[in-house]
Amino acid sequence: MQTSPLLTQLMEALRCLPGVGPKSAQRMAFTLLQRDRSGGMRLAQALTRAMSEIGHCADCRTFTEQEVCNICSNPRRQENGQICVVESPADIYAIEQTGQFFSRYFVLMGHLSPLDGIGPDDIGLESSGTASGRGKNH
């Protein structure tokens, strides 16, 4: 079946998401176009805004709209000097949901994989040593 070029483009774009194959992308595209156009517009606007406005915290490298995230700029988070090193910003979110950790983080944005040629320099491990000294003047 020959589909609309825009529909094909939408389905291909949805496939960039983890776990979304051709069938899931097709289902999502048809749902947005048939049943939830306003949801599709909200999704498009939120995605456009997030991609243009969200960057990395200068101190811990998590995602934020500011130069320094709310966690790093919180003086109470700097009192004990502890830093939790995590693989991704999703890990910070999970830890914060527990309400049990009250210090700062450093995000590697990846993991070591010598077999794939990913070493400490590739994930910013050398930057983690200076993270504890940053942000104290914010």
Image (spheres, grey):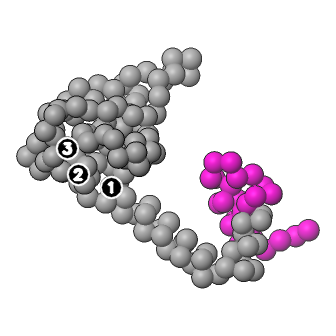
Q: Does the magenta stretch include residue 7?
A: yes
> Can you identify the residue that label 1 sits on?
64
The one of 17 and 72 positioned closer to us in this rendering: 72
Label 2 and label 1: CA atoms lie apart by 7 Å
- At 51% from the left and 22% from the top, the residue drawn is 113
Say what secondary structure mark 3 lies in.
helix
**Which mark is nearer the camera, 3 or 2?**
3
Residue 113 is at least partly visible in this image? yes
Residue 98 location, x and y as percent? Answer: 40, 45
Q: Is residue 87 left or right of residue 77?
A: right
Number of other residues with Cα within 10 Å of mark 1, as a class: few under 14, some 14 to 19, many 20 or more = some
- Looking at the picture, how far across and down is residue 127, in whole percent? 27, 30
Mark toward the start of the polypeptide (3 vs 1): 1
Asked if marks 2 and 1 touch (Cβ < 8 Å), the reply is yes
Quarter of the figure with residue 91: top left
The amino acid type of the residue labelled 1 equals: Thr
Please tell me which residue lies in front, 92 or 29: 92
- Residue 81, position as x, y percentages in the image: 17, 32
Label 2 secondary element: loop
Along the polypeptide, which appears first: circle 3 or circle 2? 2
Look at discs 3 and 1 and give the one toward the viewer. 3
Identify the residue shown where x is 63% and y is 52%: 16
Structural crowding at the residue carrying mark 3, measured as other residues with C-alpha within 10 Å and reported as few (<14), some (14–19) or many (≥20): some
Q: Up-down: is 124 above or below 72? A: above
Looking at the image, do the residues carrying marks 3 and 2 touch, with CB atoms under 8 Å apart? no
Badge 2: how crowded within 10 Å, few (<14), some, or many (20+)? many
Residue that badge 3 annotates: 77
User: Distance between the Cα atoms at labels 3 and 2?
Assistant: 13 Å
Residue occupied by mark 2 = 68
Quick check: 10 above or below 127?
A: below
